[in-house]
Image (tube, rainbow, N blue to C red):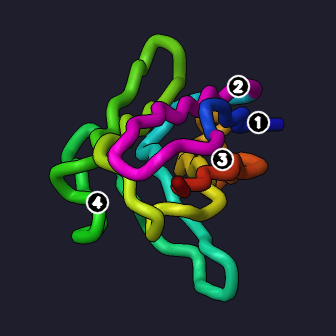
Amino acid sequence: QVQLVESGGGLMQPGGSLRLSCAASGSIFRINAMGWYRQAPGKQRELVAVTSAAITNYARSVKGRFTISRDNAKNTVYLQMNSLKPEDTAVYYCNANLRSSYYSTNNDYWGQGTQVTVSS
């Protein structure tokens, strides 16, 4: 069993900053990649940022404002969000692609989501 627990969402004024955290726990053999997605009301879930040993990618809409980082020792991924805009308002979900044991396949796991609201 794998769990992803997110924290750090909330209400922020435009131009402000927030930092999201997501800790993975449970049966983890190897984490291939961790990332953040978001879903605004009435819209599809979209990729915000993802990081692995090989690459780090950002959505065009957040590049230069958001920074993803990872603490491998803690199985934790962070999303530093600066210069927030009202259009960043969404539920943010943590994702991890990992193997839970040597014999298992790679699978995707999701956090429960954390609300980020950017409004004056």
For marks 3 and 4, the one nearer the N-term is 4
Q: In this rendering, is residue 1 above or below 91?
A: above
Spatial separation of the CA atoms under disc 4 and disc 2:
28 Å
Give x and y (percent) for residue 100: 67, 37
Q: Which residues are magenta?
A: 10-26
29 displayed left or right of 86: right
Q: Say which element carries label 4.
A: loop
- Residue 107 shows up from this direction: no
- In terms of depth relative to the viewer, which is nearer, 99 or 10? 10
* For marks 1 and 3 on the same chain, the one whose residue lies earlier in the sequence: 1
Q: Would you name the residue on which mark 2 appears?
A: 25
| Label 2 secondary element | strand
Q: Residue furthest front?
A: 120
Q: Residue at x 60, y 63 (%)?
A: 90
Magenta segment includes 12: yes
For residue 100, which numbered disc appears in the image? Answer: none
Which quadrant of the view contains residue 106? bottom right
Where disc 1 sits, the SS reads strand
Above/below status of 96 relative to 3? below
